[in-house]
Amino acid sequence: MQFLGLISRNVQGILYLFLALIFLTVSDAIIKWLSPYYPLHELTLVKATIGLVVILLFAHFFGGLSRLKTKRPWLHLLRGFLYVLSDAFYFLGLAAIPMAMTVTLFFCAPLFVCLIAKIFLRETIGLQRWLAIFVGMVGVLVIALPSGVEINWNVVFPVLSAVTYALMVIMTRKLGISDSAGTMSVYTLISFILLSIVSGILIGDGQFNVFNQVALEFLLRAWQWPSLSVYQLLTICGVVSAVGVYLLSQSYRIGEASVVVPFEYASLPLAILAGFLVWGDLPGLRDYIGSALIIGSGLVVILFEIRMSRKIPLSKTG
């Protein structure tokens, strides 16, 4: 019964993750659509503020705001800060390279979860997982070196996003033992709002926007008032993002990180579809090869975790 309960919680976590990915793909597409015109910190501030209102209303009608209390607010803010960094790196990459490529490179996250779990949680990493990590990194290089000679430095952003996201996942698992997904969502959005305000104060006048580079322009562009149609888009973005963040927190709170994380690969076909429908982007052959290596390495990790949980030797087949 204990084993069935464990599997049940992991399956719940995976289902929450699938729903989260649908909402977050819509949010990502809206941000990418607006990235040539507005700075990242402005879009993030509006999106997070709307999202916080949605989460607070949700908490009020389903259990009360008292359920959002925590004894570890600073740890939640630290987790939120990691989420902000991951989100910022991700959107900087999203502004400069195709959506499917950004998502694919972000799929290094499961590999970094393994490495970070080894360092901080002292989990054992067997030969199979070390090989998976190596193959995944090769996949990143295949995508990062489209010409075979000159590296596309914009791919560094989604990889950095994967690193900070992996740190956030480990913290989510620890905090989720005692705190709710709603609590984590609220502190995440508060972190977004605080850091967006600080960024707006420091760089919102555009004085540092002197680089002729797409990602840096998105980061350093001057603040400007959005039109009504943009506010409407950001309202949709804030609502779907809030729901996505809540479902994401719930998925890692309930399920084991090493089991849930690899299923984020389901966002790749969603990203390819969105990229094609909105921008006409389709991955090239090298992108497909790199994607296969990254995704394959992640699937090796999840297969290893499932077999270990069932105590079936890796050499056993059938």
Image (tube, grey):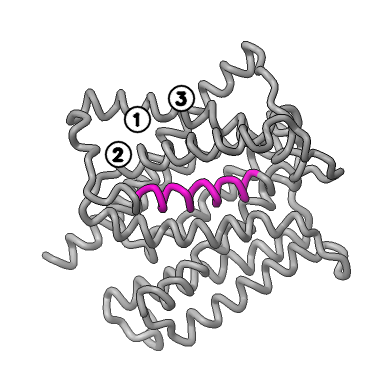
> Which element is circle 2 on?
helix
Indicate whether 110 appears above or below 209.
below
N-term mark: 3 or 1 = 3
Q: How far across and how far down the image is residue 28, in percent?
A: 59, 38
Main secondary structure type of the part rendered in magenta? helix
Q: Residue tagged by mark 3?
A: 50
Q: Residue 202 occupies which quadrant of the picture?
A: top right
Type of amino acid at the residue the image marks with label 1: Ile
Q: Residue at x 45, y 71 (%)?
A: 116
| Viewer can see residue 235 | yes
Q: Which residues are magenta?
A: 76-91
Q: Along the horizontal axis of the image, is 178 left or right of 170?
A: left
Is residue 77 within the magenta segment? yes
Which of 284/65 is in front? 65
Q: Which mark is residue 55?
A: 1
Q: Which mark is residue 182?
A: 2
Cβ atoms at labels 1 and 2 below 8 Å apart? yes
